């Protein structure tokens, strides 16, 4: 049951109780809330807690014990954070201030920021790439390397995608340049998906014109098919710190987080989202969820209007949501600003 927007007291009690529980891990009681609501009697606070429990915001661990927040209470708390100015972006900027985007590789940049996000929040992070095929091609370079391989550089509207491809011994530097020029001529301004879908037809029409580098173009197509496949990359920079922050009642929650992260298919399904903003879920919201007692906060990575990936933080339910949400939103905006060049 949703709290009526007019009932500010119940709303404030939920936010305060959840905030205290996150910081102390101590059950919620009317006595504990008295310090925050000195103008409300203990009897009234008990009545409010009973009402909120019946509404599904709290549950009692034992008949005579205090209460703990439910997923409904956590959602109320997180939504309040996101709708206010309580997110401390400056502290996150300080944590990440030593990051400099020196890498030309889009994928490498995303992976580096995901790792830094894990380090800054002490939470595992998940990067799911699932939209690279929609990027627009601006330039293509095939550069021969010393050991008969070639470096493929595809410059897109969101950054450079790079990969190594095998090079036929008969292919020289001149053929690599001709193949690059041919691909630019036919696919500049098109999406990567368009190039993959149409490259065979274009090559068939060219016939003998490209016979000397046809195998090289096939290798480029194969490399791009591999690059754009949905991929899941989990970063867990501080696993001991995550475990150090839980108490004995939260061991199962922590286990569910690591079990969830070990199942790549479940992670991809959970992290990929069509929403355009930060999304928050708790495992127990879904009966079949392998996350169970944990939580996940995710956001799409959008560069120049193109969703190319999703980035998520995973952790136990009792976590510093203000820090986590600020870090995630800052990282996502940082990527768009640096790679997309937007304001």
Image (cartoon, rainbow, N blue to C red):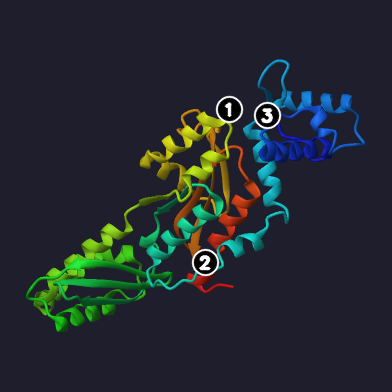
* Residue 237 appears left or right of 96: left
Q: Which residue is mark 2?
A: 336
Q: Residues within 10 Å of mark 1 (few under 14, many from 20)?
A: few
* Residue 170 appears left or right of 242: left
Q: Give the SS element for disc 2.
A: helix
Residue for point 70% across, 28% down: 27
Residue for point 56% across, 51% down: 121
Quarter of the image with the C terminus in it: bottom right
* Residue 46 appears left or right of 64: right
Quarter of the image with the N terminus in it: top right
Residue 230 position within the rendered picture, expressed as x and y whole percent measured from the top left: 35, 52
Q: Which residue is mark 3?
A: 68
Q: Which mark is residue 135?
A: none
Q: Residues within 10 Å of mark 2 (few under 14, many from 20)?
A: some
Q: Which sits earlier in the primary sequence, circle 2 or circle 3?
A: 3
Q: Give the SS element for disc 1.
A: helix
Q: Which sits earlier in the primary sequence, circle 3 or circle 1?
A: 3
Q: Which mark is residue 249?
A: 1
């Amino acid at each position: 049951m949703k709290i009526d927007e007019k009932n500010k007291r119940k709303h404030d009690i939920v936010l305060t109780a959840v905030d205290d529980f996150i910081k102390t891990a101590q059950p919620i009681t009317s006595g504990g809330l008295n310090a925050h609501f000195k103008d409300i009697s203990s009897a009234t606070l008990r009545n409010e807690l009973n009402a909120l429990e019946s509404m599904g915001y709290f549950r009692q661990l034992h008949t005579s014990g205090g209460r703990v927040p439910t997923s409904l209470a956590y959602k109320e708390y997180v939504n309040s954070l996101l709708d206010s100015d309580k997110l401390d972006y400056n502290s996150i900027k300080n944590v990440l201030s030593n990051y400099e985007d020196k890498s030309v590789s889009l994928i490498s940049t995303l992976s580096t920021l995901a790792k830094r996000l894990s380090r800054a929040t002490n939470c595992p992070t998940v990067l799911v790439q699932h939209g690279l095929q929609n990027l627009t091609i601006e330039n293509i370079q095939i550069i021969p390397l010393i050991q008969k391989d070639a470096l493929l550089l595809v410059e897109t509207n969101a950054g450079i995608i790079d990969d190594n491809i095998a090079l036929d011994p008969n292919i020289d530097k001149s053929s690599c340049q001709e193949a690059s020029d041919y691909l630019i001529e036919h696919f500049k301004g098109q999406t990567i998906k368009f190039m993959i879908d149409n490259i065979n037809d274009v090559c068939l029409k060219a016939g003998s014109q490209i016979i000397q580098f046809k195998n090289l173009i096939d290798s480029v197509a194969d490399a791009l098919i591999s690059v754009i496949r949905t991929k899941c990359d989990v970063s867990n920079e501080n696993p001991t710190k995550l475990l150090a922050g839980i108490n004995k009642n939260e061991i199962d929650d922590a286990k569910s987080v690591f079990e969830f992260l070990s199942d790549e298919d479940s992670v991809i399904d959970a992290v990929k989202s069509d929403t355009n903003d930060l999304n928050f879920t708790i495992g127990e919201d879904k009966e079949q969820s392998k996350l169970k007692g944990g939580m996940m906060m995710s956001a799409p990575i959008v560069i120049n209007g193109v969703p190319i990936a999703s980035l998520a933080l995973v952790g136990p339910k009792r976590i510093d949501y203000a820090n986590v949400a600020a870090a995630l939103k800052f990282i996502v905006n940082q990527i768009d600003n640096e790679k997309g060049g937007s304001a």
